[in-house]
Amino acid sequence: MSNIGAGPADRLRIIVEPVGDGEVPVILNARGDGAALEVERLLGRTHVDFPIARTWGTAAQARLTLHWEEDGGGFHEIQSITWS
């Protein structure tokens, strides 16, 4: 995940949900149920890698919902990803 902005993204949370049939892949360094990644602060113009583990039952596509704070305001964005 990249922060292409100049400022930091604080309390970044990425929630992964399956699209269609199948299960969500396991995010290997996630906390809790393994379906979300939490980063306390992602500095501007940096990135964080997060490995995933796919199983036979993993959905072919997932929806990523990102929540973060920037300059005291809350933001969110939804993206989709297809595993290859």
Image: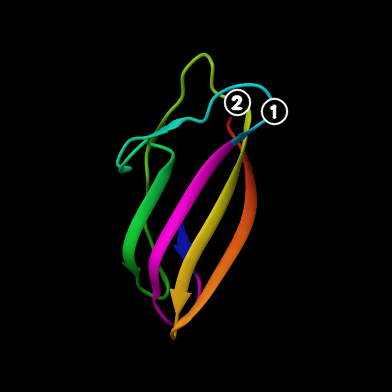
Which residue does the image show at 41% across and 76% down from the upper left? Answer: 44
The amino acid type of the residue labelled 2 equals Ala
Q: Label 1's element?
A: loop
View extreme (right): residue: 20
Q: Give the colour scheme of this rendering.
A: rainbow
Q: Are marks 1 and 2 in contact (CB under 8 Å)?
A: yes
The percent position of residue 51, horizontal first and vertical second, equals: 37, 39
> Any mark on residue 56, and which?
none
Which residue does the image show at 46% across and 62% down from the upper left? Answer: 2
The residue carrying mark 1 is 20
Viewer-nearest residue: 20 or 83? 20
- Who comes first in sequence, dot 1 or dot 2? 1
Which residue does the image show at 64% across and 52% down from the upper left? Answer: 79
Viewer-nearest residue: 80 or 4? 80
Whether residue 70 is situated above or below residue 2 in the rendered picture: below
Prevailing secondary structure class for the magenta stretch in the rendered image: strand
Q: Is residue 39 left or right of residue 15?
A: left
Whether residue 10 is situated above or below residue 83 in the rendered picture: below
Q: Label 2's element?
A: loop
Q: Is residue 53 left or right of residue 4?
A: left
The percent position of residue 27, horizontal first and vertical second, equals: 39, 37
The percent position of residue 4, horizontal first and vertical second, equals: 50, 71
Q: Is residue 82 left or right of residue 29?
A: right
Whether residue 3 is situated above or below residue 52 in the rendered picture: below
The residue carrying mark 2 is 59
- Compute the Cα span from label 1 to label 2: 7 Å
Q: For the magenta stretch, what is the residue range? A: 4-17
Label 2: few (<14), some (14–19) or many (≥20) C-alpha neighbours in 10 Å: some
Viewer-nearest residue: 68 or 50? 68
Q: Is residue 52 magenta?
A: no
View extreme (bottom): residue: 71
Label 1: few (<14), some (14–19) or many (≥20) C-alpha neighbours in 10 Å: few
